[in-house]
């Protein structure tokens, strides 16, 4: 990744958030498990909120005034998985694996952008996005662990 301006970074992040909205929305329409569908729809909604915040960084600081920053544990389940490509013919476990990897990459992206940010308000936006992606990653890893335990793994 090579950017020449902060605006390019923000637009890149917005594109990634829009991709995530489309990804989770698409998956939610093609999954048979109602609980999983609701979870994926919730992730799509959260990713849309991230997109909206990036779209209007000038108002982001106001949105962050009441945001509670907290440490989100990383159980690192996705760190040991290989990248996957096409979700069309995946079973539930594969969809969770694919989603975990996507959240892992989003978290890495926002950590990199946080390091490059030079203004405190922008750092706070990226800290918030890091935390939100870490929450998604943890939720997916937990869903995966629970599902695999139910399967006897």
Image (spheres, helix red, strand yellow):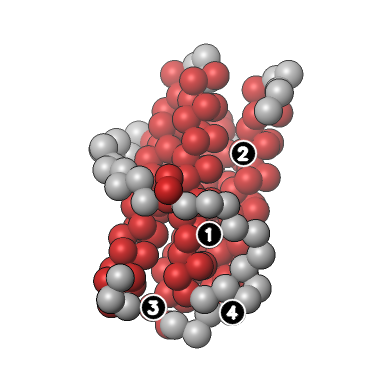
Judge depth for marks 4 and 1 and give the one in front: 1
Which corner quadrant of the image does residue 62 belong to? top left
The first of marks 4 and 1 along the sequence is 4
SS class of the residue under badge 1? Answer: helix
The relative height of residue 151 versus residue 72 in the rendered view (above or below) is below
- Evaluate whether residue 8 shows in this view: yes
The first of marks 1 and 3 along the sequence is 3
Residue toward you, 128 or 63: 128
Judge depth for marks 1 and 3 and give the one in front: 1
The first of marks 4 and 3 along the sequence is 4
- The CA distance from mark 3 to mark 2 is 29 Å
- The CA distance from mark 4 to mark 3 is 13 Å
The answer to whether the residues at label 4 and label 3 have Cβ atoms under 8 Å apart is no
**Callout 2: few (<14), some (14-19), or many (20+) C-alpha neighbours within 10 Å?**
many
Residue 70, given in percent of the width and then of the height, sits at 26, 38
Q: Which mark is residue 35?
A: 3
Q: Which residue is at the far front? A: 153
- The CA distance from mark 4 to mark 2 is 26 Å
Residue toward you, 123 or 85: 85
**Residue at 45%, 70% in the rendered image:** 93
**Residue at 50%, 67% in the rendered image:** 94
Q: Which mark is residue 30?
A: 4
- The CA distance from mark 4 to mark 1 is 15 Å
Q: Is residue 24 left or right of residue 111?
A: right
Residue marked by disc 2: 13
Residue marked by disc 1: 98
Q: Which residue is at the far right? A: 4
The first of marks 1 and 2 along the sequence is 2
**Residue at 54%, 19% in the rendered image:** 116
SS class of the residue under badge 2? Answer: helix
- The CA distance from mark 1 to mark 3 is 18 Å
């Amino acid at each position: 990744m090579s950017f020449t301006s902060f605006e390019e970074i923000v637009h890149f992040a917005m594109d990634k958030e829009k991709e995530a909205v489309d990804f989770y929305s698409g998956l939610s329409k093609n999954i048979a498990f109602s609980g999983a569908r609701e979870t994926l729809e919730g992730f799509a909604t959260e990713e849309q909120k991230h997109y909206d915040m990036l779209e209007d960084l000038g108002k982001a600081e106001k949105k962050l005034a009441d945001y509670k920053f907290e440490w989100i544990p990383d159980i690192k389940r996705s760190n040991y998985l290989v990248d996957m490509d096409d979700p069309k013919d995946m079973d539930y476990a594969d969809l969770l694996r694919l989603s975990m990897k996507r959240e892992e990459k989003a978290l890495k992206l926002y950590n990199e952008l946080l390091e490059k940010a030079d203004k405190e308000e922008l750092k706070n936006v990226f800290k918030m996005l890091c935390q939100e992606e870490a929450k998604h990653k943890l939720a997916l890893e937990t869903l995966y662990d629970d599902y695999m335990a139910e399967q006897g793994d």
